[in-house]
Amino acid sequence: MPANLPPGLPILPDGERASTPLPQASVSQPQHVPFDMSEEEFETAVEDALELIPPKVARAMDNVAIFIEDDYVPGPGEDPDTVLLGLYEGVPLTERDSWWDAGSLPDRITIFRQPILDICESRDEVIHEVAVTVVHEIAHHFGISDDRLHELGWG
């Protein structure tokens, strides 16, 4: 694991899944201009982050697809101001039973480009935030809760 990423691997399942919310900004914080990165560069950052996943962990991933979208659109009943960097949708490996394989669609991990660019001021920050978000969402695939991920430094 590169030294510039938070500790936490190997990942040990111990909880429920959740999404990765962006912390609310304080009113007193100065505004910054979001970092500008092309879709192709961002996709490369996501691919590079996936390459950081240890081979044993990557082999254990089962029936999961990774997507990149520009932004999260809150659904009906959700706070319209909800901002997510990433989202895991599916049945974590820790909750799957024999019924699960019968025609189940792949789990879905989505990395949201614009919210990540909005909080970053440099290419290095984008690469770091993408790596943390990818690991965070993959951890949910393994059944690891947000609380545990924050304890491990992958919040």
Image (cartoon, rainbow, N blue to C red):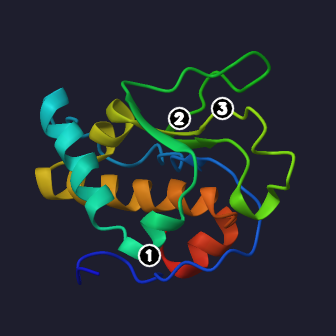
Circle 1 sits on which residue? 56
Residue 127 in view (yes/no): yes
**Disc 2, SS:** loop
Q: x, y percentage for residue 59?
A: 46, 65
Q: Earlier in the sequence, mark 2 or mark 1?
A: 1
The quarter of the displayed image where residue 131 is located: bottom left
Residue sitting nearer the eye, 63 or 17: 63
**Residue type indicated by callout 1:** Lys
> Which label lies toward us, 2 or 1?
1
Residue 83 is marked as 2
- At 49% across and 83% down in the image, what residue appears? 10
Between the residue at mark 3 and the residue at mark 1, the CA separation in whole angstroms equals: 23 Å
Q: x, y percentage for residue 140?
A: 62, 58
Query: From the viewer's perspective, is residue 118 above or below residue 142?
Result: above
- At 79% across and 37% down in the image, what residue appears? 102
Query: From the viewer's perspective, is residue 26 above or below residue 125?
Result: above
Q: Earlier in the sequence, mark 3 or mark 1?
A: 1
**Residue type indicated by callout 3:** Leu
Q: Are marks 3 and 1 in contact (CB under 8 Å)?
A: no
